């Protein structure tokens, strides 16, 4: 599952009077949590996404890009918002994404990305919606408008409870570490929980490990192992 950022400011945009380091440049593209945090906004209300602000200039400098391949499910153009009145731009695009994180139906997930407060929507996005043709990661969605008195967008990713369960192994609450996860083909990272006291072996030389040599009598503490598949 390839997902890219919805915005990518040029390094020159993140400079003031002195050259900023890469970290400062990256931080300049992070969401603005002061006004548009998740899941609670500044006024204490439910806020399902994040505000990304700090855009300067025009053209690619304030462009918004599709985060993944998908299909345009909805769009609405900005109605000529008077930004001098500190109003939010109301252009919006919603894209449906489908991908495989494992084998068969269990490994298929569907999620949506929402790009809100756009001032301009790319004509190609409107055409893709009208024709039902796909859009691709890094396709131009449009250009930012105004959000909470800043040049920026509201961005969010959402999916159904059933898809949340496929991705995280649960619909809510904490993950049950005593229960095994999906055992069929898994794409991407695999995570293992090994509780303290579990025997560790150099290698398995018999199905019941009877002929194996213990690396240690047991683990001294809980271990969490991440297996990254390339």
Image: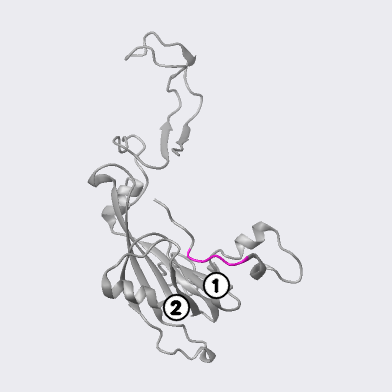
Residue 171 visible in image? no
- Examine the rendered structure and indicate whether residue 108 appears above or below residue 210: below
**Which stretch is magenta?**
6-10
Q: Which mark is drawn over residue 117? A: 2
Cα distance in 3D space between marks 2 and 1? 17 Å
Q: Where is residue 191 in the image (x, y as percent from the top left)?
A: 42, 37
Q: Where is residue 72 in the image (x, y as percent from the top left)?
A: 32, 69
Name the quadrant of the C terminus: top left
| Residue found farthest to the top | 211
**Is residue 209 left or right of 140 when viewed as pictured?**
left
Front position in the image: 64 or 116? 64
Residue 30 visible in image? yes
Dividing the picture into quadrants, the one containing residue 210 is top left
Asked whether 216 falls inside the magenta stretch, the response is: no
Dividing the picture into quadrants, the one containing residue 141 is bottom left
Task: Tell me the element at label 2.
Answer: strand
- Examine the rendered structure and indicate whether residue 146 appears above or below residue 23: below
Question: Residue at left 32%, top 45%?
Answer: 169
Question: Residue at left 44%, top 68%?
Answer: 155
Q: Counting residues from the N terminus, which is met first, the one under dot 2 or under dot 1?
A: 1
Q: Where is residue 220 in the image (x, y as percent from the top left)?
A: 51, 24
Q: Which mark is drawn over residue 60? A: 1
Q: How is the image coloured?
A: one colour
Question: Residue at left 54%, top 72%?
Answer: 60
Report the magenta stretch's main SS.
Answer: loop
Question: Residue at left 55%, top 68%?
Answer: 32
Front position in the image: 78 or 210? 78
Task: Tell me the element at label 1.
Answer: helix
């Amino acid at each position: 599952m390839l997902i890219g950022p919805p915005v990518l400011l040029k390094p020159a945009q993140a400079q003031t009077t002195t050259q900023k380091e890469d970290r400062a440049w990256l931080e300049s593209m992070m969401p603005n949590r002061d006004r548009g945090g998740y899941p609670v906004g500044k006024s204490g209300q439910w806020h399902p996404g994040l505000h990304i602000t700090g855009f300067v200039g025009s053209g690619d400098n304030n462009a918004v890009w599709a985060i993944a391949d998908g299909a345009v499910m909805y769009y609405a153009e900005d109605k000529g918002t008077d930004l001098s009145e500190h109003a939010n731009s109301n252009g919006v695009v919603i894209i449906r994404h489908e991908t495989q994180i494992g084998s068969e139906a269990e490994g298929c997930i569907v999620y949506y990305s929402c790009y809100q407060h756009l001032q301009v929507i790319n004509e190609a996005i409107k055409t893709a919606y009208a024709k039902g043709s796909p859009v691709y990661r890094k396709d131009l969605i449009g250009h930012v408008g105004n959000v909470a008195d800043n040049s920026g967008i509201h961005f969010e990713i959402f999916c159904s409870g059933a898809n949340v369960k496929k991705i995280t192994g649960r619909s809510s609450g904490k993950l049950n570490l005593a229960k095994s996860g999906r055992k069929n083909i898994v794409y991407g990272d695999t995570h293992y929980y090994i509780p303290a006291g579990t025997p560790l072996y150099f290698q398995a030389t018999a199905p019941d490990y009877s002929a194996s040599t213990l690396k240690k009598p047991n683990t001294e503490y809980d271990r969490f192992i991440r297996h990254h598949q390339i």
